[in-house]
Image (cartoon, rainbow, N blue to C red):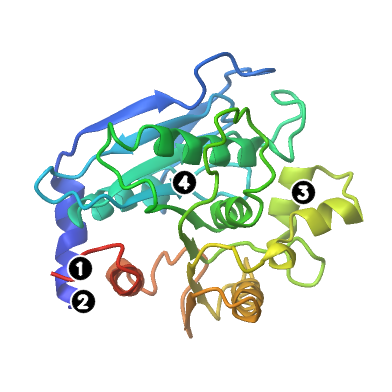
Amino acid sequence: MLYRFALLFILAGHCCFAQQEVPLYAGSIPGADNEEYKKANDQVDSLTFNVSIPTLTVFLPPKDKANGTAVIICPGGGYGVLLTKREGSDVARAFNQLGITAFVLKYRLPSDKTMKYRSIGPLQDAQRAIQLVRQKAGQWNINPIKIGIMGFSAGGHLAATAGTHYSEALIDNTKAVSLRPDFMLLINPVISFTDSIGHTGSRRNLLSDSITDEQIRRFSNELHVNKTTPPAFLVHSNADAVVPVTNSLTFYSALQRNGVTAELHIYAKGEHGFLTAPPFDEWFGRCVYWMKEMELIPTK
């Protein structure tokens, strides 16, 4: 089993799938100032800085494998940078091998210079991504009730925020398209902004230094779970020294209290980002198993 997923991931890196980068918004972005640039990194392959022009890169699976499920991927980076390859395109290609249509969301990074309200800019982009994918579901051969969101670290915070704040539309939504993701895949996620377990770097980058108690409550996602929150898969390392595992534990507990289907895996070892452990095929294999159990991927 593990060998099969390892081979799958290697093949994913070498197969060429149809992909296209599309602008997230049809019109202009208020206050947009394109300063974006990329930088190579030995550990994570690629870093994207100063994102102010959000896009969605579409990764289509082979037509004979496509099963109608879609995942919007939010790379991590503490709301200060995006790991667009290791936590983006690499994972998208692995999903393609399973027949899943994947989208890498290059969401805006909070900046007083490029957005009027920095705290909601990334969430606006996540909501718009869900809206766009659902609107174009027919074009991309997607089942509109099988559109999920995945996030790593701070991208996990964004994904969880999208899953708990979907009723608060922060974008133009005159056609009342559902902004609720159908499921969440949260990988060593930042969940809370509280002093006790929150990731202060992500909190500072999203909210700036002028942080209020109201903002902390608003963006501590464990406080906003209810019975309509989407089902979730969570994975974390107990040894994570950057984002405490308590984030995942707290969110899982909130899901359980509200009767929301959820699965949580905690590894004894492994640093934040799973750079060396657990290996990709291990945690991704558990994610795939959960998706099969949830009938998001055919079992055969």
Specify the farthest residue to the top: 28
CA gap, disc 4 and disc 1: 22 Å
Q: Which mark is residue 2?
A: 2
* Marks 4 & 1, CB-CB < 8 Å contact: no
- Asked if the residue under mark 3 is in contact with the one under mark 1, i.e. CB atoms within 8 Å, the reply is no
- Report crowding for label 3: few under 14, some 14 to 19, many 20 or more residues within 10 A (C-alpha): some
Residue under numbered circle 4: 83
User: Crowding near pointer 1: few (<14 within 10 Å), some, many (20+)?
Assistant: some
Amino acid type shown at disc 2 = Leu
Could you tell me the amino acid type at mark 1?
Phe
Cα distance between the residues tagged 4 and 3: 19 Å
- The extreme left residue here reads 64
- Whole-percent x and y of residue 86? 38, 51
Residue 7 in the image: state x and y as whole percent: 14, 64
Q: Is residue 101 left or right of residue 71?
A: left
Other-residue count near label 4 (Cα within 10 Å), few / some / many at <14 / 14–19 / ≥20: many
Q: Quadrant of the N terminus?
A: bottom left
Up-down relation of residue 174 to residue 125 (above or below): above
What amino acid is at disc 3? Arg
Work out how far the residue at label 1 is from the one at label 3, CA to CA, in angstroms: 37 Å
Q: Which of the 4 image quadrants contains residue 194?
A: bottom right
Q: Which residue is mark 3?
A: 204
Tell me which residue sits at (55%, 41%) in the image.
Answer: 126
The secondary element bearing badge 1 is classed as helix
Q: Is residue 42 above or below residue 250?
A: above
For label 3, the SS is helix
Q: Which residue is mark 1?
A: 5
Name the residue nearer the viewer: 30 or 275: 30
Q: Which badge, 4 or 3, is on the more N-terminal residue?
A: 4
